Structures are given as C-alpha cells and as structure tokens.
Image: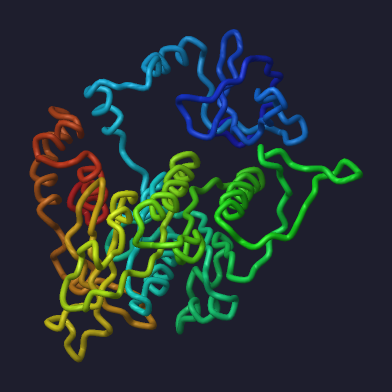
Amino acid sequence: CVGTDYEEVINVRGYATPSPLHSGCYDVLTEDKVYPIAAHYFLRNSTGDRSIDNGSGPYSLQHSSLSLRDYLKAVERFHAPWHTTAEILELADKEEDWAWEPFVLFGGLTLLIADSGAGKSTFTTSLLNSVLQGEPFLDFPTHRARVFYVSEESVKGIRRRTESPEPSAVQSSELIHWMYWGQKVKTKVKDASGAILKDGKGEDLVAWSPVTWPVIREEVELAIEQFNRTSPQRLPALLVIDTLSFWLEMDDSSGAMDVIGALKPLREFAAETGIAILGLHHSNRQVEQTGKHTKASYLGSIQWKAQSDVMLLLQYAPASLADPLSNDPRILEMEKTRYDEVPDLRLRYNPHQGYYRDGSESSTPGGGLNDTDRKVLALHPKLKEGSIKQKDLATEAGLNPSQVSRSLKKLKAKGEIA
C-alpha cells in the first residue's frame, strides 16, 4: 500500500489502458476502482495488445489507487490533444521537483557545456557529492537522489576524477552507480519489433554488448525497478551522461538534425520516467575565449539550446576576475532556462572544498537575502494571517510560484520566518 510499511495482496480483474495521469504506467480499471501499475509489468503480445507478465510480480502501485468516479473526473480533460489557455496555465502552475534547484530538474534535461579541461567533470563531482547527501550546492538546495553516471573515462580515469584530499560521498555512497568506457553489458537479444529472442531451449537469448544509448536506457530502467523492489527507501534518480557526443554518437554536433535526433530521446526518457538528466558536452572551440561567449558559433548548433530545459555554461573567468588569489576562477552562466533565471555565479575551486561561490551566503555575515527574498519577507505576514494564499503572494510580488516556494524554505532555514 502506498505510504505504509506493509503489503496488501489483492486480486484485480479489469481492463488495462495506458495512463493519461501518470507517465510510464497502465491504469487497471475495475468496476469500482482504478490501480496505476508500472508499464514494465505488461508484455506486448502478437496482436499488439498488452497482457500482464505473470512472472514479474509482485506488482507495486506506482501511485495511489482512485475510485472509478474520481478517475473518470480526473481524465475528463483528456478528451482531445488540445488544451485551452486556462488549462495550459493550470498545468504550468504545478510546482517542479528539482535535483538541484533551479538548475537540474526531475523529468527534464539540463546541459552543462564547457571547453575540454574547463572542469565539467570536476564541477559535476562536486554537485553529486551534495546531491548524494541532500545538501545545498553553491547555496542552492539539492534533493537526495540515486545517481547513475555514464563516463567516457576508463576505470582508472574515474578513480582520478573521484580522488580528493577529504572523504566524499562520491567515494563512499552506495547510491552512485557507474558505467565506463570499454565496458560490456549482458543484454537480451531482441528482434526488430522489440520481442526477446529465444534459444533452442526456450530461454532468453543473451549477448555481451558495448554501452550505447539503448543499453543505458534499459539498464537504468532495470536498476530503478530493482532498487524500488528491494530498497526500504525509494529515491528519485539522476542520470549523468559524460559526454553527450561520445555516448550518443552524433556525426555532427553542429548539425541541427543530428542534435535533435540525439537529445529528443533523452527528453522523452526523462519525461516518461521522471528522472533528471544532466548531459555534459564539449563546447565548440572555434571562438576565442575572451570574456563571455554565448553565441551559437561557440556552442555549435542552436538546437543544443532549443532542446534543453536548462543550459549551463561553465567558463573560465575573464581577466578582471582572474587575480593571483582567485583559486582557479570560473563563471557558471545560465544561458537558457524554461523556469527561474539565476544571475551568473562567480565560482572558485579548492581541492579540499571543491567548487564554492565567490562571496557566497555562507561567507557573508548578515547577508544572503536577494530581492526575491525581501519581497516574500515583506508579504509573509499576509500569508501567515491567512489573508492571501501562496499562489496569490506570488502574483502580488510578480514572482513565479516556484520562486516563492524556494524563498520560503530559505527564509525558514535562516530563521527569518517561523
């Protein structure tokens, strides 16, 4: 049962249909109730229909069951693929879930682009060290998550990347899992329709395959399913692909159709499963690095920007910031976002500390409140007395609901509000 520590065995007889409410689920409709069950429990038969896989139970509810009446009411809006503007705004008003807010989104694709050697992998390691512990990174909150990291490095290269003078979660946590260059994965052989082939004994035909995107996707899905069955605590997942051009085998990273063809499956996978995807990519080095350089000629195809939910550029700091005591300065620039914009972050790096903010809140006594926080703080008395709701507070302050939610958490953590 969802939200409890015990299991209930039930006998369900009904009609299964793809769920319009939950991605990756089938809704099993009975005379009085509807049970959302993960799609991977169903097998496609020769007629194209799906039948239950009786060998893969027990079947875990992915979401709470609904009465048939409530279910039919919930799916009324799905009578057609078109939505009114009011319906779109209602859907858009849903608060996002973040692996690293507001940079890496569960159910979305974030790109981190930088020159080779600028520190993408090192930056990502610092981020993951925080995500694995659910601790803030660069003064922005993270959500504890299970991490799947696909690296273009060999095992010795990964060891070098993860070495640090201080103990880290990346070194010791059981929540991070790796694939690496040169690795072979045991996979089931399938025909063109996706059906698993059998050997002469009627057993699944298997082969050792190199790591490719279809293999990555399948292995991540299997791992999540296994962990959800066996782990006492279900956690969201973050997939890191280092680098995209290496694993997605693009012929031309500056070609629009090549980039669309590579990134579209990632976006679909994130949306279907709800996992966060962080893709690392080498920038086009044809542009001289002087100050900020965010033109398409620097990035390659403009589709890198168009296909991502969030695009981050990790750049060497301009000469004005590169003083002798700068500790290897960088600039993290949010080049594109579908959500809340964040000004450029001035970063520094220390082997003992990883990446940290230049002038971060943690090192600024009595500071740390930005304009958003001050607006929310000024209107908080109305929220506390109940004269306005949080959504109305956002409208009155000229902010997004997610900005207000994040600011309220921050103000509570700093003791500014109760």
Q: Judge from the rendering whether residue 185 lies leftward or rightward of residue 383; answer left or right.
A: right
User: Total label count?
Assistant: 0
Q: Quadrant of residue 136?
A: bottom left
Q: Judge from the rendering whether residue 131 lies leftward or rightward of residue 101; answer left or right.
A: right
Q: Image point 52% across, 30% down: which residue?
A: 63
Say if 42 sits above or below 201 in the image: above
Q: Judge from the rendering whether residue 167 lies leftward or rightward of residue 101; answer left or right.
A: right
Closer to the camera in the image, 143 or 177: 177
Say if 23 sits above or below 342 in the image: above
Q: Quadrant of residue 137?
A: bottom left
Q: What scheme was used to colour the molecule?
A: rainbow
Q: Position of residue 103 (x, y in %)?
A: 31, 55
Closer to the camera in the image, 6 or 342: 342
Q: Position of residue 126 (x, y in %)?
A: 40, 70
Q: Image point 80% across, 48% down: which residue?
A: 205
Closer to the camera in the image, 411 or 338: 338
Say if 99 sits above or below 114 in the image: above
Q: Image point 18% across, 73% down: which residue?
A: 359
Closer to the camera in the image, 381 or 331: 331
Query: Is residue 418 at least partly visible in the picture?
Result: no
Query: Is residue 355 at least partly visible in the picture?
Result: yes
View extreme (right): residue:
201
Q: Position of residue 113 (x, y in %)?
A: 33, 66
Q: Position of residue 131 (x, y in %)?
A: 42, 60
Quadrant (top left, top right, bottom left, bottom right) of the N terminus: top right
Q: Quadrant of residue 382?
A: top left
